[in-house]
């Protein structure tokens, strides 16, 4: 690994290599987003990997707070280039709010009144509206919104007619930026490894077997952590792992 591990320089998520945009999780492919419980487990794993690789929270791309509120948790992505998303887990369901700063004309900033793209909130349930007003989730600054009630059997979006984007890929097939920003939700450990290698400019490839162990929520041990980053603070990693429900070994 490079001496500069822990310093993020890459501008953020991108689709995994050799994967077509049509197979990626997005607002046009909601079925590719994991079910709520696996989704939460995935984001716990990704956040723990981020902490192992980067000791400064401000420099991490992904994070997870298992105690966001009473019966609530929150995962987030911020890439340092103005793109972000927030994934809120509540007792009555979940909400995913995302913003791609290059998603014109779907960005609110493309309209004088800074309104959301027409139809984005059509059908949004009252039970989940608290997430829309949460100050930490950049209210109103969204190019895509996905939700799912606890009683639902699928993810949902509003009644949206997507605009055409630039003819150059990936913009043409990704009008709201969700394919670009949600690539990590494919659940593939290799996707995270590729993103992290770019994010942190690693000289060597991440140990994919170690990444897979974290994805599988296997016990977090000193050896496993050191395999990924020998300079990581195991005591702090262990504390975070326990808070997210991981078993911690020696």
Image: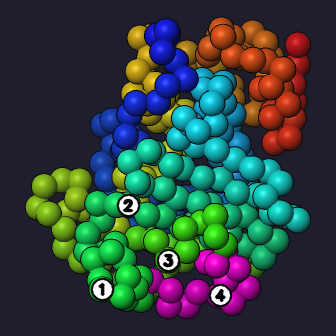
What residue is shown with label 4?
A: 125
How far is the residue under mark 1 from the one under mark 2?
18 Å
What's the magenta region? 120-133
In primary-sequence order, the first of circles 1 and 3 is: 1
What residue is shown with label 1?
A: 112
Evaluate if marks 2 and 3 touch, with contact meaning CB atoms under 8 Å apart.
no
Pinpoint residue 110: horizontal percent, then vertical percent: 27, 77
Q: Residue at x 43, y 63 (%)?
A: 99
Of circles 2 and 3, which is in front? Answer: 3
Pinpoint residue 231: horizontal percent, then vertical percent: 66, 11
What residue is shown with label 2?
A: 100
How far is the residue under mark 1 from the one under mark 4?
27 Å
How far is the residue under mark 3 from the one under mark 4?
17 Å
* 168 lies above or below 237: below
Of circles 1 and 3, which is in front? Answer: 1
Secondary structure of the residue carrying tag 4 is loop
What residue is shown with label 3?
A: 140
In primary-sequence order, the first of circles 1 and 2 is: 2
Pinpoint residue 2: horizontal percent, then vertical percent: 46, 10
Quarter of the C terminus within the rendering: top right
């Amino acid at each position: 690994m490079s001496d500069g591990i822990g310093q993020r320089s890459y501008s953020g998520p991108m689709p995994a290599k050799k994967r077509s945009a049509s197979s990626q999780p997005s607002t046009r492919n909601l079925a590719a987003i994991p079910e709520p419980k696996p989704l939460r487990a995935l984001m716990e794993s990704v956040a723990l990997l981020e902490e192992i690789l980067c000791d400064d929270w401000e420099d991490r791309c992904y994070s997870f707070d298992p105690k966001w509120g009473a019966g609530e948790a929150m995962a987030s992505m911020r890439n340092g280039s103005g793109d972000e998303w927030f994934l809120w887990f509540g007792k009555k369901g979940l909400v995913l709010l995302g913003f791609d700063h290059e998603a014109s004309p779907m960005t609110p900033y493309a309209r004088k009144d800074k309104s959301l793209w027409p139809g984005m909130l059509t059908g949004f349930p009252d039970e989940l509206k608290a997430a829309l007003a949460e100050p930490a989730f950049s209210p109103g600054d969204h190019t895509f919104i996905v939700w799912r009630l606890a009683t639902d059997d699928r993810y949902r979006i509003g009644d949206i007619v997507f605009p055409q984007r630039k003819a150059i890929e990936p913009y043409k097939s990704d009008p709201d930026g969700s394919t670009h920003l949600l690539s990590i939700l494919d659940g593939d450990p290799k996707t995270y490894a590729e993103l992290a290698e770019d994010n942190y400019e690693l000289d060597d490839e991440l140990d994919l077997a170690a990444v897979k162990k974290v994805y599988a929520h296997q016990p977090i041990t000193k050896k496993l952590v050191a395999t990924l980053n020998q300079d990581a603070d195991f005591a702090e990693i262990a504390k975070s792992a326990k808070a997210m429900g991981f078993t911690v070994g020696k």
